[in-house]
Amino acid sequence: MKYYERIRNILSCVNIPPASKVVLIYLMDKQGNNRHSWPSMETIQRDCGLRSKQTVVNAMARLCEKDLITIEKPDRPAIGKTNRYSINPAGLKYRPVQKMDGSKKCTRAGLKNGLEPVQKIDSNGSYNDPLTTQKEMGDKTAAASGSRKAQTAFENARQLYPGTKRGLATELKDFQKHKDWEQVAFLLESAIQREIEHKSKQKTAEKFCPEWKHFKTWINQRCWEQEFPDEDDNQLTHECAPEVAMALERSLMQ
């Protein structure tokens, strides 16, 4: 399939929001011969002109939920390493294309009558196309499958969490109180890994590092959304002595 045809298919997709379309097009544009790309969240936000990093996170979650992208984490997670993204375009649902009947006159009424009718959108946001009726009948099964995948992602994140835990059933029930739990479930593991790395850096630098919260508290406070400042390892951690500062100032004035 040609490049412009892929772009057109993504733009006409009806099952993902606009921000996810932008991110999907961006990842497709960045992928090389191996069909992979590995930009950071900050790079995606800057290049796509999105409002915040959280917008990118939500867009990624929606694409994962629809199985439109696959995220591969580095074998050895470390500061500066990013995930690798692969595109799975098979899950795209396209909007029916309007075709012009050449026999109609090029008037306002002719244009109106010359276009094939576009099917109405149902309550699920899908087009009622007779040709795809059987496919739409499987939406409920796909939704149930997506819920099971989200629960599996939550269980994996829970096992990775170093803090105190109460019980899988109880904590999953608390987590499902969030309306977007199926979307963010796939982001928990990477968020926990980032916090592990941040706490490790704090301890190495002999800085204050708070203890891990109870996992239930971590969930209720949506701690997967917290961001940690980027610190330069080569940056000085203290101010220079006053006499050194005065000597520097005199040398600049000469």
Image (cartoon, rainbow, N blue to C red):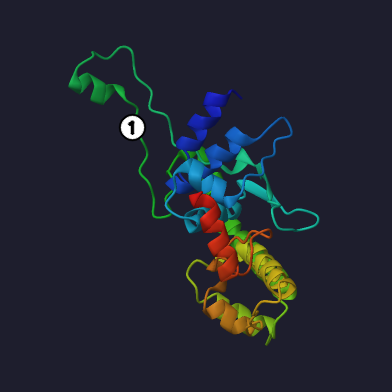
Whether residue 209 is situated above or below residue 93 in the rendered picture: below
- In depth, the one of 211 and 161 nearer the eye is 211
Which corner quadrant holds the N terminus?
Answer: top right
Whether residue 200 is situated above or below residue 248 in the rendered picture: below
Instruction: Say left or right for 198 vs 18.
Output: right
**Element under disc 1:** loop
Q: Residue at x 42, y 29 (%)?
A: 97
Q: Is residue 33 visible?
A: yes
Q: Which residue is mark 1?
A: 117
Whether residue 181 is situated above or below residue 79 in the rendered picture: below
- In the rendered image, residue 142, in percent from the top left (x then y), is placed at 60, 56
Q: Residue at x 57, y 60 (%)?
A: 247
Q: Residue at x 62, y 40 (%)?
A: 90
- In depth, the one of 78 and 112 nearer the eye is 78
- In the rendered image, residue 226, in percent from the top left (x then y), is placed at 54, 69
- In the rendered image, residue 180, in percent from the top left (x then y), is placed at 50, 66
- In the rendered image, residue 233, in percent from the top left (x then y), is placed at 68, 60
Dividing the picture into quadrants, the one containing residue 100 is top left
Q: Residue at x 51, y 31 (%)?
A: 7
Instruction: Say left or right for 168 vs 52.
Output: right
Instruction: Say left or right for 199 vs 174.
Output: right
Instruction: Say left or right for 202 vs 183.
Output: right
| Three-letter amino acid code of the residue under disc 1 | Pro
